[in-house]
Amino acid sequence: MKQRKIQIGVIGGREETPEVLQAACEVGYLIAQKGAVLFCGGLGGVMAAACKGAKEAFGLTVGILPMEQSQLANPYVDIVIPTGLGVARNAVIINACDGVIAIGGKFGTLSEMAFALQREIPIVSLYSWEIDPAVLVAKTSEEAVTELFNQLNKLNLLP
Amino acid sequence: MKQRKIQIGVIGGREETPEVLQAACEVGYLIAQKGAVLFCGGLGGVMAAACKGAKEAFGLTVGILPMEQSQLANPYVDIVIPTGLGVARNAVIINACDGVIAIGGKFGTLSEMAFALQREIPIVSLYSWEIDPAVLVAKTSEEAVTELFNQLNKLNLLP
Amino acid sequence: MKQRKIQIGVIGGREETPEVLQAACEVGYLIAQKGAVLFCGGLGGVMAAACKGAKEAFGLTVGILPMEQSQLANPYVDIVIPTGLGVARNAVIINACDGVIAIGGKFGTLSEMAFALQREIPIVSLYSWEIDPAVLVAKTSEEAVTELFNQLNKLNLLP
Amino acid sequence: MKQRKIQIGVIGGREETPEVLQAACEVGYLIAQKGAVLFCGGLGGVMAAACKGAKEAFGLTVGILPMEQSQLANPYVDIVIPTGLGVARNAVIINACDGVIAIGGKFGTLSEMAFALQREIPIVSLYSWEIDPAVLVAKTSEEAVTELFNQLNKLNLLP
């Protein structure tokens, strides 16, 4: 039986600077290059940028939306889960991920980092919250992805 | 922009006869052959059989689990969403689907059919509940998939 | 320690005939008279009528809404839980109840009855779905409440 | 029509020092004295202490549990909502509250504060996270409740 691919979440805000969006796009690209499936909230901003990057590297993207309308997903989402759960979908995103990279973002992102800290999965922060020593802080998109996969490797979570 | 693939749910029971499981496997195969993504609850019985069939046709499978443990997914699930939502995940499965085929099943399946009827998406019943005229009844796995895609076609939901 | 009060759900449609709404009001009244807390979806139709009846008997009412806006609760709801979960809140309502009376209703009500059947809690149907022998069928509001409490009594669920 | 009572959440950890639990008990007492309904996660630690305090002041308490088993609620919960939603229930708790007091706690509490910040409802921190200027910091239980109700008053949220 072939093992399932690693599932990596990219979480972050809907409204970010071009610099942050560029980083999100690069992070998405690198995640896909490593053969992982990219999970996100499926909407705009960091989520759309990361999905766009992943598609450029021929990756697979999953968008877990708060609303019931699948047509509200960004155009780079392959698999759309329009949950209808509102912000409770933040918990579902984190439950689905083996590791998470937070890029920018505000309180929605903070709630997701809190759930990730509670689950004790690897988390990297790039221009985002640094609320706990368990959060690895990265300065570039490359560093963020490298740190996350190093951590996953240490925990024997890579296929 | 490439359009997203159609997402088809296969819902049904964990404990079914070999005949029903065989039908589920065939339904999964045919769904994958038509290029659709197969959605299910990610566990055993009808869910595992349908995923197995889809993988034999090189399809993509998504399992939306009630619990938080991804390792409880059946081995034919490619993308695993361990929601932790309990039975509320039944609503999430249906919200994610463009159409549904019910195969066997009991009350969990009934709740999913009810959500599908409420959303007014195409539903086919194969050895399952026939609670409303809107539910199309099929006698074979082939008939089930054909009827569902005819209905999706009528509604202009096919890419 | 005082034991918690019995929690009874009244489920049903938003648009019903005056006859059905009158029955819902009477059911709410009788549930409150028996000292139980009335649970419902918190919106209009059967839900509002049942809450109104319960308040006439000085009972306590809980409304578990699909949306996040508490102001959309009917005016007879004492405790409002605006879940934001969409239809997934149907599962939460049923998980909170010791027994359920279904009055009228369509597919939303059917999903709730399915969850109640799965949990194997007592269910009475009044002008509603009769999908399984485990559903007790009543012809009047009084009969509905009496049958439900008889069933709860048999199961030693009454305080 | 009588207006609904204010609904105040007390969030915090399961394992806390006696000093923190004493503060939670006092906070619960004061909330009930002000005529508000106390909402919490329904389990032990800060949640049980706050409910105990509220009951000493003859208040009403609501426990929104992550699991489906109502018997796991602490004995001071009047209305139990065993959601079965896992940690996604944190979003439901916050959606139900007009204001929140955080007492101690770790990442679960942090996720709830993040949701409360996103909803822009009044939040007071007592021995808890101070992650944003919008979080009012209190040093005593009395100060916490006074600050919260002052804030609710300013926003015209008191009945």
Image: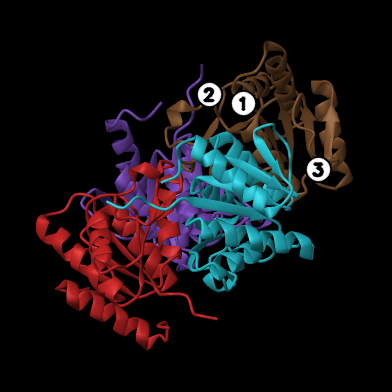
Chain colours: A purple, B brown, C cyan, D red
Which residue occupies 82% across, 40% down?
A: B132
Distance from label 1 to label 2 (Cα)? 8 Å
| Left or right for C37, reference D147 | right
User: Label 2 belongs to which residue?
Assistant: B74
Mark 2, Cα crowd under 10 Å, few <14 / some 14-19 / many 20+, is many
Q: Position of residue D138 (x, y in %)?
A: 19, 74
| Left or right for D41, reference D22 | right
User: For the residue labelled by badge 2, is the local secondary structure a helix, a strand or a loop?
Assistant: loop
Q: Please identify the quarter of the rendering in which residue B17 is found.
A: top right
Q: Is residue B71 above or below residue D92?
A: above
Chain on which label 2 sits:
B
User: Label 3 belongs to which residue?
Assistant: B158
Identity, as a three-letter code, of the amino acid under mark 3: Leu
Q: How many marks?
A: 3
Which residue occupies 16% across, 53% down?
A: D16
Q: Is residue C23 visible?
A: yes
Asked if labels 2 and 3 share a chain, the reply is: yes
Chain on which label 3 sits:
B
For the residue pair A84 and D10, the one nearer the viewer reads as D10
Circles 1 and 2: CB distance less than 8 Å?
A: yes
Please tell me which of labels 1 and 2 falls first in the chain. 1
Identity, as a three-letter code, of the amino acid under mark 2: Asn
Q: Position of residue D118 (x, y in %)?
A: 42, 68
